[in-house]
Amino acid sequence: MRAQSIEYGDKITVIKVPEFNFTALEVGSMLSKAHRHDNLILDLRGNPGGAVDTLKYLVGGMFDKEIKIADRVGRKNSKPKIANPCTIRTSES
């Protein structure tokens, strides 16, 4: 259930994400690899979901503005889930 990546020169990287269950450090490593290339293909086929915080961190590392990723719907109300732009962490600090 680890993320796998394939790089095609400096133009494209493909990252297969089997589920959203990674530490911030692991997501930082994925984002660091993605930022070294001009294009990213994020393969989510077969991904059943996982930790919302992992998804927020992954999406936040790809954009320079807030991104609404979902609405959490309850019986009486709904709350938006927002991914904030974040700095990529590549090592424990």
Image (cartoon, rainbow, N blue to C red):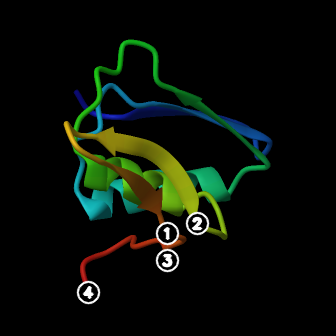
Q: Residue furthest front?
A: 76
| Image quadrant in which you'd find residue 45 | top left
- What's the CA distance linking mark 1 and mark 4? 20 Å
10 Å crowding of disc 4: few (<14), some (14-19), many (20+): few
Nearer-the-camera pick, 42 or 79 = 79
Which residue is labeled 1 in the image? 84
Amino acid bearing label 3? Thr
Which residue has dot 3 on it? 87
Image label count:
4
Mark 3 and 4 residues: CB-CB less than 8 Å, in contact?
no
* Residue picked out by circle 4: 93
Q: On the rendered image, what quadrant is the C terminus found in?
A: bottom left
Task: Report, in whole angstroms, how far the alpha carbon at label 2 lies from the one at label 4.
Answer: 25 Å
Q: CA distance from mark 1 to mark 3?
A: 10 Å
Viewer-nearest residue: 30 or 86? 86
Query: In which quadrant will I find the N terminus?
Result: top left
> Disc 2, disc 4: CB below 8 Å?
no
Residue 55 spot, x, y in % from top left? 37, 47
* Residue ID at (45%, 59%): 82
**Marks 2, 4: nearer the viewer:** 2
Task: Please determine whether, in this image, residue 49 is positioned above or below residue 74.
Answer: above
Find disc 2 in the rendering and name its residue: 66
Local SS, label 3: loop
Q: Which of the 4 quarters of the picture holds residue 17?
A: top left
Badge nearest the viewer, 1 or 4: 1
Callout 4, which amino acid?
Ser
In the displayed structure image, the side of residue 73 where residue 35 appears, left or right: right
Q: Which percent across, then down, holds residue 92?
A: 24, 78
Q: Earlier in the sequence, mark 1 or mark 4?
A: 1
Residue 29 visible: no
The residue positioned 46% from the left and 23% from the top of the image is: 44
